[in-house]
Amino acid sequence: MKSSHSKAAKQTRALVGPIHEVLGNIAEHEHEYSIHRLLQTLLNAARDRLSMEVAFIAEFTDGQRVFRQVSSDASIDIVKAGGGGPLEESYCVRVVQGVLPELIRDAQKNSEALKLEATRLVPVGAHVSVPIKLTDGTIYGTFCAFSRTPNQNLDARDLAFLRVLADISTVYLEHQLQAHNPDQQQRKMLASIIDKHLINTVFQPIVRLTDGHTVGYEALTRTLAQRMPPDQLFRLAISHGMNDPLSEMAITSAFQLGSQLPRDVYVSINAGPEELLNGLVEKLFRQQKDPSRYVIEITEHAIVSDYEEMMHNLARLRRLGVRVAVDDAGAGYASFRHILCLKPDIIKLDISLVRDIHHDKDKQDLVAALMEFSRRRRSILVAEGLETREELTQLLKLGIEYVQGYFLSRPGDVSQFRAQAFDCYAGVIFDNPGEDQGRAGVKL
């Protein structure tokens, strides 16, 4: 048995020739090689052994033949990584279907090959191609090599050599596919959330500190599919091109449930620059009987690609009576630019400024500066992320009028707030609920 294995190993080494040493070096220094470099090594070996001008790995995807890796002679620029064309017009699919042989010494003498435009235009001379089959039997694509001139010396050993390289490439390609598998899982998760409406809208009160009255609620989206922060969920949706249906579902849900809240409070609905710029938000708000009840809250540290267009779109919303809020003020350059360019009616302090503000003089000074800025701009300032009595005390000292956070209320279902008294937080804010209630507050 031992001699049999030894004989097979010698035969393999004889078949693949110099590539055996290359693969041995890769095996010994695997961590130093990227998948791109590994596949490039295999393609280079194919060109060297078969005396070809071009070698490539092609993937079959969505009716296209896409060149994923290419090794090409410097004097030829026919095939480029990332390029491709319709699968039905390729040698590759005909080889897999058995219409064309895997080894063609002279394509100009093959009647089936001459039906393809590329045979005449390139022109194609010698051509060798073998399918790349994944372990589940799926055809990934093909491992190919060709030249513009015929090669009558190609034989079965050359074809066997290419099959060995294709088998080796399969290992790395499957590893690459698995590495990208989270993307596929994310797409499935998002599609499931959208198709099955697996979201829940909760609300968090925005409270006036002068009297403990609830003046508004922020609508917040939670997914029922799995635990995931909403900002992460919407970033995934944007990256997979699924933001519009998810955003439409979230905004529509906020409208439907928000209509059950007391009429004397406003409802703040989150939206990102993408859905504001493409007109989705305006379309949904125009469907409401009383758009003036709502605030559109521009979320996160999102980059606005076109402030002029954004301001134009927000102006149309404002004509409907919708007010504009900018979230996360003080969290970075993007939020400050939002404030300067978009001129919001409401500025919401980032939680990072509120957290432990009683211990941090720099935070107190920055909040005081933002208060003065908002006063001059006739904007309302809301402190988000209030979590402790000490933070509340400091915000009161600074003169902050509106707050939102766990210290007063966690986000909850609409039923929790439907019949809640407006001034229910006065007792939490003041030791004496009647204290300071006579102070005039800005109407929000």
Image (spheres, rainbow, N blue to C red):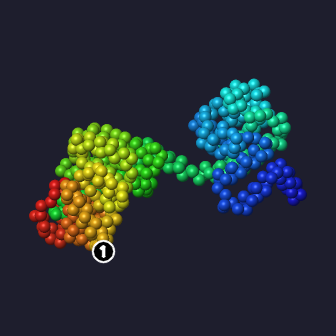
Q: Is residue 318 above or below residue 217?
A: above
Helix, strand or loop status at disc 1: helix
Q: Nearer the viewer, residue 407 or 306?
A: 306
Q: Nearer the viewer, residue 107 or 341?
A: 341
Residue 265 shown left or right of residue 76 in the figure? left
Residue 427 shown left or right of residue 335 in the figure? left
Residue 116 shown left or right of residue 277 in the figure? right
Q: Residue furthest right?
A: 3
Residue at 50%, 50% in the rendered image: 186
Q: Amino acid at mark 1?
A: His
Residue 354 shown left or right of residue 239 in the figure? left
Residue at 68%, 35% in the rendered image: 92
Can you say which quadrant of the picture contains the N terminus?
bottom right
Residue 258 picture location, percent across and down? 27, 48
* Circle 1 crowding by C-alpha within 10 Å: few under 14, some 14–19, many from 20: few
Residue at 64%, 51% in the rendered image: 36
Reading the image, the residue beneath label 1 is 359
User: Which quadrant of the structure image shows residue 423?
Assistant: bottom left
Q: Is residue 414 above or below residue 155?
A: below
User: Which quadrant of the structure image shows residue 3?
Assistant: bottom right
Residue 27 visible in rendering: yes
Residue 319 picture location, percent across and down? 22, 41
